[in-house]
Amino acid sequence: MADPVAVCPAFQLGRPQHKQDSFLGRLRHFVDIIDPRTLLVSEERLKACIKLLDDFKHDKLPPGVSDQQLWEAQKVKQAIIHPDTGEKVFMPFRMSGYVPFGTPIWLNQSHNACVNYANRNATKPTPTAKFLQGYVGAVTSAVSIAVGLRMLIDKANKLNPSTRMIIQRLVPFPAVACANICNVGLMRHSELSEGINVLDSDGHVVGSSRIAAKHAILETAFTRVVLPMPIFILPPILMSYLERLRFLQSHRRLLLPIHSLVCLATFSLSLPLAISLFPQMSQIEASHLEPDIAMATDCKVLTYNKGL
């Protein structure tokens, strides 16, 4: 029989249930965070989870509450509440809503922009004007890249077969990756000028760092480059097999919905893999930050919220 302690470790408030120093631990953590079932959590359930965690914090926990219940309450809170602002993230823009609310290209890039903004480091307020500026820039640049890609592929039809094949197979991924990078950078550009809070080992704010902000945005942008990789690789391989099945050869009208389901399943797989590349609460050596921050603390390593 499995050891229950090993299955469910002792609860630690504000800390992930799974260790974040390994990819597998981060993957298990983010699978919880992006669980689409949390989209269905009611307001009453959320308040009950927050109260349970507050009771634990103030040593007022009612008898009979298990570690598993506490971990589940923290999972619900982390999936819905922004760690910096303490406010609810609008349902379609939570990471748990990234896959279910993903839609065709022009609206998809608009949705990406809102997801990037809603899951940013929010230790500094963003004026509405800067949000709108970033939003327009992010969507415009991303859609422009997509339209340029479409025009390039259309022109490729007039080229010789080998050149056409290279363009059609190799160009889409870097185009989508560039669009995603632009989206992240423009939606979070205010962090580069304002900086983000860095914390010591006790969770106290040491200062506001532009260098940490640059690291946070670069790490997030890299996850958005990795995110579409499986989508460009797995569906063509799976569909080449499925299309040879006798059933689908006699029911060709099912190819499109099946292809859509395959892409959706691949997206559901690639999202946790991509965002697990880095922990959400990343660390950086104090000596690599601004001199005033490095001199303001005895801690050698500081922590910052990378965002998702």
Image: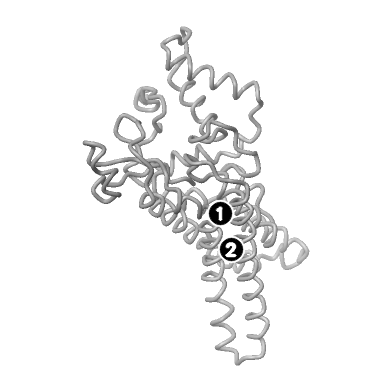
- Badge 1: few (under 14), some or many (20 or more) residues near its Cα, within 10 Å? many
Above or below, 169 against 291 in this view is below
Quadrant into which the N terminus falls: top left
Q: Which picture quadrant has residue 201? A: top left
User: What is the number of callouts on the image?
Assistant: 2
Of the residues under marks 2 and 1, which one precedes in the sequence? 1
Nearer to us in this view, 227 or 84: 84
Residue at position x 26%, y 45% from top? 286
Nearer to us in this view, 3 or 283: 283
Q: Which residue was labeled with disc 2?
A: 235
Q: Secondary structure at mark 2?
A: helix
Q: Which mark is residue 187?
A: 1
Q: Position of residue 146 (x, y in %)?
A: 63, 70
Inspect the image, locate mark 2, and give the three-letter code of the amino acid beneath it.
Pro
For discs 2 and 1, the disc positioned in front in the rendered view? 1
Residue at position x 66%, y 26% from top? 42
Q: Secondary structure at mark 1?
A: helix
Q: Position of residue 108 (x, y in %)?
A: 66, 57
